[in-house]
Image (cartoon, rainbow, N blue to C red):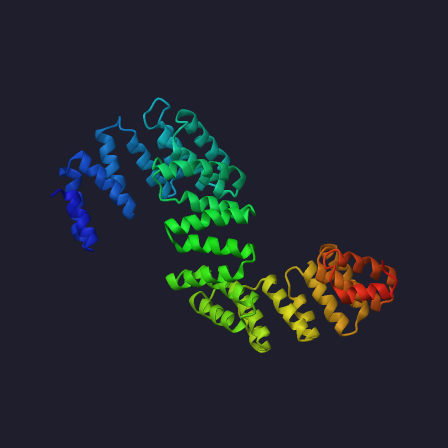
């Protein structure tokens, strides 16, 4: 048995001192092929220093083997030694047999550096050399997918489906799943469902099921969404991102007790997910637990002192007619001039019969919220109380373009002479 194999066995048994001894012997006594294989295994296992030593040893003996430079560049990338990686890759000339591989590695490097334009340039150059290589097409599709350029990614994925089905493309990435996710994010939900259903027939992973569930949610197929999310939870309770959408979809169906239970399990497993506190607050309020609802939002604020959670709390306090608390809370916001903050402030002042202050806040809020139906309705009703009937008609008529079946507003407009 080679020292390389003995080292790998020692690693698998947790005998790291013995593994180090076998490594030193392998460096001296094993064949180049054995050392090359060991270097690749060690890289995969995360033993970057030892892998680099082996590759350096091999490069010294075989300087013409430029594939070793690519392996060393990959180690440099893992070590964030970008300059060294670039130097190694730039040493490989277009005449080299591994030039295309070096271009792919450079593309990966520039993608990690968040310079997708250069990454795309490297992949395009590789494709000119090997126009029929599906792995290059896959790299391009993955690049477009990563920068959310789904319009360019989808046609490539569609072509790659043929290569995947024929066995020409050997990849750990499910092209069918990727295509479904890309279509879903483009808003093509019906087509996305078709591909995602195929993906889970081939390989029922939690991630594929999750993407399918989110797509069904967009189609408002709540029962199917619930079924899929529950299945994910049963498959893997540690798939933490399942708890918020499951609680939300249960809440959407009026299953508030079930939603509260799921949200609490999610919080217990991941107490840093603010969305879980938000949905827990909503369902607690629906269950008549107003104090619990407030506490959930207070916990969210304690975790992340952001305006978003504070606005959620302000919205809840308005429902409880806690107008003074709403005013105090809005004063604490980092951006108290934002539309929703001023809207809530206007409602609070209106509830306290401080109408001039309410008017100021409404006028500030309408700058941002002129097309938000809830605000338009509130503002229109406030203007009616102020006796500004022409403005009332203007705003409530605008509101009916969003909610034409609001009988109360239709009758109100009719009573004051609206069209």
> Which residue occupies 74% across, 59% down?
404
Horizontal and vertical percent for residue 292? 55, 76
Question: Is 397 drawn above or below residue 6 in the view shown?
Answer: below
- Extreme top residue here? 95
Question: Is 52 drawn above or below residue 356 in the view shown?
Answer: above
> Which residue occupies 49% across, 68% down?
263
Horizontal and vertical percent for residue 108? 41, 38
Residue 119 in sight here: yes
Relative horizontal placement of residue 292, taking residue 57 as reference (left or right): right
On the rendered image, what quadrant is the N terminus found in?
top left
Question: Is 273 drawn above or below residue 78 in the view shown?
Answer: below
- Nearer to the camera, 58 or 108: 108
Q: Toward which corner of the image does residue 132 lie, by quadrant?
A: top left
Q: Toward which corner of the image does residue 377 lie, by quadrant?
A: bottom right
Residue 337 in sight here: no
- Nearer to the camera, 322 or 401: 401
Horizontal and vertical percent for residue 200? 40, 51
Horizontal and vertical percent for residue 188? 55, 46
- Nearer to the camera, 418 or 308: 418
On the rendered image, what quadrant is the C terminus found in?
bottom right
Question: Is 216 drawn above or below residue 60 in the view shown?
Answer: below
- Nearer to the camera, 281 or 229: 229
Relative horizontal placement of residue 258, taking residue 22 as reference (left or right): right
The number of discs equals 0
């Amino acid at each position: 048995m080679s020292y390389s194999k003995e080292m790998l066995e020692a690693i698998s048994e947790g005998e790291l001192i013995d593994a180090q001894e076998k490594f030193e012997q392998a460096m001296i006594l094993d064949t180049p092929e054995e050392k090359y294989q060991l270097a690749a295994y060690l890289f995969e296992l995360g033993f970057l220093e030892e892998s680099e030593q082996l590759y350096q040893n091999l490069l010294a003996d075989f300087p013409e083997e430029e594939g070793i430079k690519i392996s060393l560049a990959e180690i440099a990338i893992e070590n964030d030694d970008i300059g060294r990686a670039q130097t190694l890759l730039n040493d490989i000339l277009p005449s080299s047999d591994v030039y295309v591989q070096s271009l792919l590695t450079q593309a990966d490097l520039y993608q990690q550096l968040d310079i997708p334009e250069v990454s795309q340039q490297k992949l395009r150059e590789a494709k000119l050399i090997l126009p029929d290589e599906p792995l290059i097409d896959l790299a391009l599709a993955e690049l477009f997918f990563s920068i959310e350029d789904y319009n360019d990614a989808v046609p490539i994925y569609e072509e790659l489906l043929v290569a995947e089905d024929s066995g020409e493309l050997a990849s750990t990435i499910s092209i069918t799943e990727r295509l479904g996710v890309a279509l879903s994010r483009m808003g093509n939900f019906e087509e996305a469902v078709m591909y995602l259903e195929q993906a889970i027939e081939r390989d029922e992973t939690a991630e594929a099921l999750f993407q399918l569930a989110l797509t069904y949610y967009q189609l408002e197929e709540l029962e199917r969404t619930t079924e899929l999310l529950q299945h994910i939870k049963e498959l893997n309770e540690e798939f933490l991102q399942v708890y918020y959408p499951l609680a939300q979809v249960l809440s959407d169906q009026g299953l508030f007790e079930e939603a509260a239970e799921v949200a609490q399990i999610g919080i217990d497993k991941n107490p840093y997910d603010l969305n879980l506190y938000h949905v827990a607050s909503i369902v607690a309020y629906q269950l008549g637990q107003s104090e619990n609802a407030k506490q959930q939002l207070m916990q969210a604020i304690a975790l992340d002192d952001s305006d978003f959670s504070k606005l959620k709390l302000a919205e809840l306090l308005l429902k409880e007619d806690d107008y003074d608390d709403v005013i105090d809370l809005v004063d604490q916001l980092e951006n108290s001039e934002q539309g929703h903050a001023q809207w809530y402030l206007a409602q609070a002042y209106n509830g306290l019969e401080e109408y001039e202050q309410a008017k100021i806040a409404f006028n500030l809020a309408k700058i941002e919220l002129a097309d938000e139906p809830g605000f338009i309705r509130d503002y229109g009703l406030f203007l009616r109380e102020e006796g500004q009937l022409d403005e009332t008609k203007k705003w409530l008529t605008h509101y009916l373009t969003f909610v034409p079946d609001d009988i109360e507003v239709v009758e109100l407009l009719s009573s004051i002479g609206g069209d």
